[in-house]
Amino acid sequence: MSADTRPLQTASFGRARRSFRDWRGRRPFWGGLWTLLSGIPIMYIPYQTMTLGDLHLRMATTAGAGSLIIGVLLVVLGLTLWFQQQSRIFAGVAAILLALVSLVVSNFGAFLIGFLLALVGGALGVSWMPGKPAAGAAPGDGDPAGDDGTRTELPGLSLIKETDGGHGAH
């Protein structure tokens, strides 16, 4: 290992981390993650066989196929929240509705684990809003108070009532 390779790995890792942070900030990342993770217990638990000594307990129900479909749809909705931010409200509402359906179909929403994850993930997906891009800080932008604390008038905004009767003609 040469002395030049170590800084390149650190710089590359830092750049990848910043890139991931920027990618994560432009989408409902946590809502998508919780929604995606909610599909796993809903898909898995109804097909699981528990073994207690010599006793085998099968959790399969008649709605096993329904649980599989709900789990797959929740995983797809989680990916939709990540990669199609425009449909975040639809995906969030659909995740909440599927979470409610999983209570009945999938062993109480896979013992409430998948239900709670889908509920929180859907709510985060619905409530997420894209941030506004940070504009260059020019004097007079943003805060109407100047550097010396005096208020400056914003163009087009007035607290004085017009007295022309609302006709607009003078």
Image (cartoon, rainbow, N blue to C red):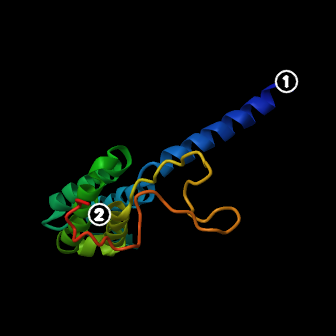
Q: Is residue 83 above or below residue 34?
A: above
Q: Amino acid at mark 1?
A: Ser
Q: Residue at x 64, y 62 (%)?
A: 146
Q: Is residue 17 left or right of residue 98?
A: right
In the current view of this chain or complex, which residue is farthest to the left? 62
User: Label 1: which residue?
Assistant: 2
Residue located beneath label 2 in the image:
42
Question: Horizontal and vertical percent for residue 38?
Answer: 35, 62
In front: 124, or 134? Answer: 134
Amino acid type assigned to the residue bearing label 2 in the image: Ile
Kindly identify the residue that appears in the image at 19 percent across and 64 percent down.
167
Q: In which quadrant of the rendered view does residue 19 lie?
A: top right
Which image quadrant for residue 83?
top left
Q: Residues within 10 Å of mark 1 (few under 14, many from 20)?
A: few
**138 with respect to 132 (left or right):** right
Comparing 59 with 158, the one in front is 158
In the image, 136: left or right of 104? right
Residue 40, percent from left and from top: 35, 58
- Disc 2 to disc 1, how far (Cα)? 50 Å
Placement of 72 over or under 63, stated as above or below: above
